[in-house]
Image (cartoon, grey):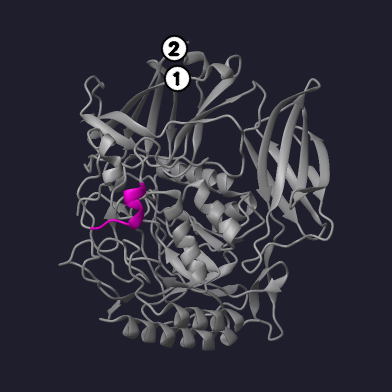
Amino acid sequence: MLFCLAALAAQAQIWKPVEGPIATPWAEKVDPSAPLPEYPRPLMQRDAWVNLNGMWDYAVLPRDAAFTVPDGQILVPYCIESCLSGVGRKVTPEESLWYRRSFNVPKAWKGRRVLLHFGAVDWQADVWVNDIKVGTHTGGYTPFSFDVTDALTGGANTLTVRVWDGTDSGFQPRGKQQKEPEGIWYTAVTGIWQTVWMEPVASEHMASLRTTPDLENGSIRVKAEGVCRGIVEATLLADGRKIAVARAVAVQEAELKVPQAHLWSPEDPYLYDLEVSLTVDGKVVDRVRSYCAMREVGTARDAQGILRMTLNGKPIFMYGPLDQGWWPDGLYTAPTDEALAFDVQKTKDWGFNLIRKHVKVEPARWYYHCDRLGILVWQDMPSGDLHGPWESNRWFQGNEFERSAASEACYRKEWREIMDCLYSQPCIVVWVPFNEGWGQFKTAEITAWTKQHDPTRLVNSASGGNHFLRVGDILDLHNYPQPSMYLFDTRRVNVLGEYGGIGMPVEGHLWQPDRNWGYVKFTSPEEVTDEYVKYALQLKDMVARGFSAAVYTQTTDVEIEVNGLMTYDRKVDKVDIPRIREVNQQVINALK
């Protein structure tokens, strides 16, 4: 199928999507002159900025070769393997992917520092401005920035990026990517896959904001990162009305008292507006807009003595789909922001209150949509390195995977960056360092380190195994297709981290019509819905016995997997939504 809008005929000479088997409805809404034009960082907004997405020159060359003549043009920020990139080409570990474009700095920015931002580049990025090296970053899932001011000229500037990605030939975190996709492993993603942009700042400016709600003391603490002098002033607003102001020296937290706090929950996802300024030597040098929420996650025993997860001090059953975050046209990148929000809203429509973001990290705007729509998120660390031994249905008795020093350092760097960049998102309630023994190592140590780095969330140390007694806050079981409670830990919260996988191929909406699979397969929405309801009612009976959360596989079909609640192209629902919503609410309410 060739998806190209007649309205984009003027741009067709320089860009058109590569022919692919299926596409989402939003593929036709991609504007190559301004793809993903939305402000990319909702938690920290400044007024002045320039989006650098669009058509760039590119070349795929031997790994150590220099970039001279481009192979053609690519639409950034869609990865080179995707249809929406306009290229649809694989890159091997023996090759590097080069990008180049020109840009101008607005004259109004004169006298200010200019920051160049990348939402995410998979995996190693070397960056030059006007052939001057401005920085290197490793890690495929987190944003990074360089101060490029000293490399700029007064007129047109040239931005060059070189990317190398070993995917499954290296030890770096890669999630479900594989050079030769098969089964549960999907098409590799190489290069820029989130928005590239720039903004002007003062020499003294805030790098990020760290907000921590404190329900016990009725306050929100705000820390401006990246500044070492000056006064930080934080202003909290409710529905446009100023309700609190607090000041602190730059290296301290400003504590905002929140009278009669309006708590955030999936049923009532209330967000406060936040304005933060930095004053140095009596002059305001930086000012940003943000938002925050009053919410708290924890654990407590119920009347039967079973340990439950709590939200704002009350028991809650967390229930939602395993969400892989893949797109047939953009792979890791949603075609539009509307598409990015669609999956979150759909999860709400199905009656869920949770998404488990599976071995992938999304752009900042996805978490913003979860924050504003009211979806709890379990955030996985993207898996990497080789698989270790996996024991799913008994307490761990074997050896963990032994990583090299370089592999361990890579894991720790990327996991720390992920936790740091997502810390202030209200939606995130659980960190998941490991899944099913995939590269799992030093479980007790990594769990303790994760908890120490962010004590405000629960840690699900080993989703599906290997299981360590007394490690982390959660014992997480996986079982396909039906729910099963085959282990129980009296000292931790017990959850069913994966189950389901009810498959149904839908003709005309398949990645590969002759290759598709699910854990169990049916032929009609009625059969799929009946089976889903049967499993959900089994799960409901297990809530009283001790389950405090469950994750159903999965939101959409992904490549040759056909076990989604909707098709990979998001065009067909494979279940009766009113019936699904009703039974999901029954499961969630079973704990109330």
Asked whether 385 or 535 is in front, the reply is 535
Residue 24 falls inside the magenta stretch: yes
Q: Which residue is mark 2?
A: 155
Q: Which residue is mark 1?
A: 104
Left or right, 419 with respect to 87, comes to right
Pointer 2 with pointer 1, Cβ within 8 A: yes
Crowding around mark 1 (Cα neighbors within 10 Å: few <14, some 14 to 19, many 20+) is: few
Q: Quadrant of residue 589?
A: bottom right
Residue at the location (76% across, 27% down)? Answer: 279
Image coordinates of residue 213 in percent, x first then y, are 73, 54
First in sequence, mark 2 or 1: give its number: 1
On the image, the x and y values in percent for residue 498 come to: 43, 72
Q: Is residue 50 above or below residue 430?
A: above
The label shown at residue 250 is none
Q: Quadrant of residue 254?
A: top right
Q: Which region is colored magenta?
A: 22-29
Question: What is the residue that sits farthest to the front in this orientation?
Answer: 7
- Of the residues shown, which amino acid type is indicated by label 1? Asn
Which residue is painted at 38% across and 48% down in the image?
Answer: 333
Residue 431: x and y in percent read 55, 58
Q: Quadrant of residue 516?
A: bottom left
Identify the residue shown where x is 53% and y is 40%.
39
Residue 429 in sight in this render = no
Image quarter where the C terminus lies is: bottom right
Q: Residue furthest top?
A: 154
Tell me the kind of residue under disc 2. Gly
